[in-house]
């Protein structure tokens, strides 16, 4: 019997190929006329201490949203209309914020506001519902265009809403609305990735300039989530101060840590779930502690 052996160079190539790690494409596949439903939940706790006083406010916002893909161009960029179908909001204050106690709003509820704070909050949040928001997103999940409706923009820019923003924070600002609707869209690499690959992105923060959000990402590989194998991306959220604005306000980030994960279905090419936690301590004329937890989940479409 004749035994044939392969040349050494061929063996080396074959061995190298067998050791090449499996790669996964992490890019969206937008489809014209498809509709996606995402539930976005943002829990935001803040505490500011000034001398002997403090202002502490715990808030929760849940948005039921519909993403209707209107068109997709040759590059894979999708024009999408985002509609907020339902708003649920909760707020409780302590210290100087104790004037807000057990405030609850649900756009599906017919409850009439009683107090002055309730009337202001209810009026603005009702304007969120069924107000079309035009968004353009590419295959990597990068937001190239974001445009609130004229009615919602006018509502957020009026004096009453600005007063609410001064008390409750960015939830009552255009930047805050954009952050909650799009900050979970982690920008994905153009090329396929292997386990351990890393990348980084910067995006506008919920408070706008001069604070910038930074996501440090690494591909963790396939995992089982809710009985299905999906691709997991580890995400470390951070913020950083930049520009003269931060210096003028004397803001310094003295402590922060964050963790999270993005679960991506590489078969349907869309994000199924996002969980992000972040703890930040800022210091200027006062010391402010911020704790956020954001969860996003794709709601399955009803079977036809």
Image (cartoon, rainbow, N blue to C red):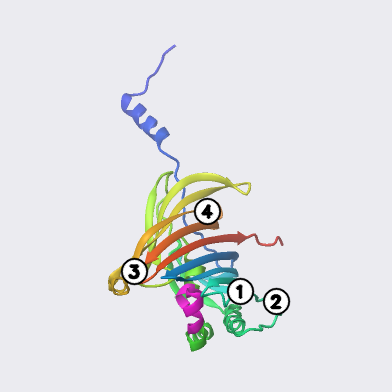
Which segment is the magenta one? 162-176
Label 2 element class? loop
Q: Name the residue under label 4.
A: 264
Tell me, for residue 173, which label it has, or none. Answer: none
- 3 or 4: mark nearer the eye: 3
- In this picture, is 251 found above or below 191? below
Label 3 element class? loop
Label 4 element class? strand
Q: Is the magenta stretch mostly helix, strand or loop?
A: helix
Estimate the x, y position of residue 185 in percent, counting from the top left: 48, 62
Graded by Cα atoms within 10 Å as few (under 14), some (14 to 19) or many (20 or more), the crowding at tag 4 reads: many
Residue at 38 percent of width and 53 percent of height: 199
Estimate the x, y position of residue 156 in percent, counting from the top left: 50, 83
- Counting residues from the N terminus, which is met first, the one under dot 2 or under dot 4? 2
Whether tag 3 and tag 2 are in contact, CB under 8 A, the answer is no
Q: Mark 1 points at which residue?
A: 101
Q: Mark 2 points at which residue?
A: 109
Q: Name the residue under label 3.
A: 251
- 1 or 2: mark nearer the eye: 1
Q: Answer left or right for 87 relative to 250.
A: right
Whether tag 3 and tag 4 are in contact, CB under 8 A, the answer is no
């Amino acid at each position: 019997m004749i035994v044939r052996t392969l040349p050494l160079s061929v063996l080396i190539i074959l061995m190298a190929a067998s050791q090449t790690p499996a790669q996964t494409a992490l890019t969206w596949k937008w489809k014209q006329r498809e509709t996606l439903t995402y539930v976005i939940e943002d829990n935001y706790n803040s505490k500011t201490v000034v001398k002997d006083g403090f202002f502490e406010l715990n808030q929760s916002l849940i948005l039921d949203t519909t993403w209707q893909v209107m068109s997709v161009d040759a590059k894979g960029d999708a024009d999408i209309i985002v509609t907020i179908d339902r708003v649920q909001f909760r707020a409780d204050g302590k210290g100087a914020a104790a004037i807000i106690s057990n405030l609850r709003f649900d756009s599906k509820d017919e409850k009439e506001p009683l107090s002055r704070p309730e009337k202001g909050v209810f009026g603005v949040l009702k304007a969120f519902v069924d107000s079309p928001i035009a968004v353009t997103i590419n295959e990597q999940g990068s937001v190239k265009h974001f445009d609130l409706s004229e009615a919602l923009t006018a509502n957020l820019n009026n004096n009453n809403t600005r007063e609410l923003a001064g008390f409750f924070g960015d939830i009552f600002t255009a930047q805050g609305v954009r952050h909650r609707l799009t900050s979970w869209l982690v920008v994905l690499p153009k090329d396929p990735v292997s386990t351990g690959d890393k990348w980084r992105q910067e995006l506008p923060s919920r408070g706008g300039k001069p604070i910038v959000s930074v996501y440090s990402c690494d591909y963790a590989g396939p995992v089982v989530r809710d009985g299905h194998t999906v691709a997991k991306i580890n995400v470390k959220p951070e913020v950083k101060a930049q520009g003269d604005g931060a210096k003028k306000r004397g803001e310094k980030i003295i402590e922060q840590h964050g963790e999270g994960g993005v679960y991506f279905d590489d078969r349907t090419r869309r994000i199924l779930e996002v969980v992000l936690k972040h703890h930040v301590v800022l210091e200027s004329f006062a010391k402010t502690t911020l704790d956020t937890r954001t969860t996003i989940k794709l709601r399955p479409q009803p079977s036809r």
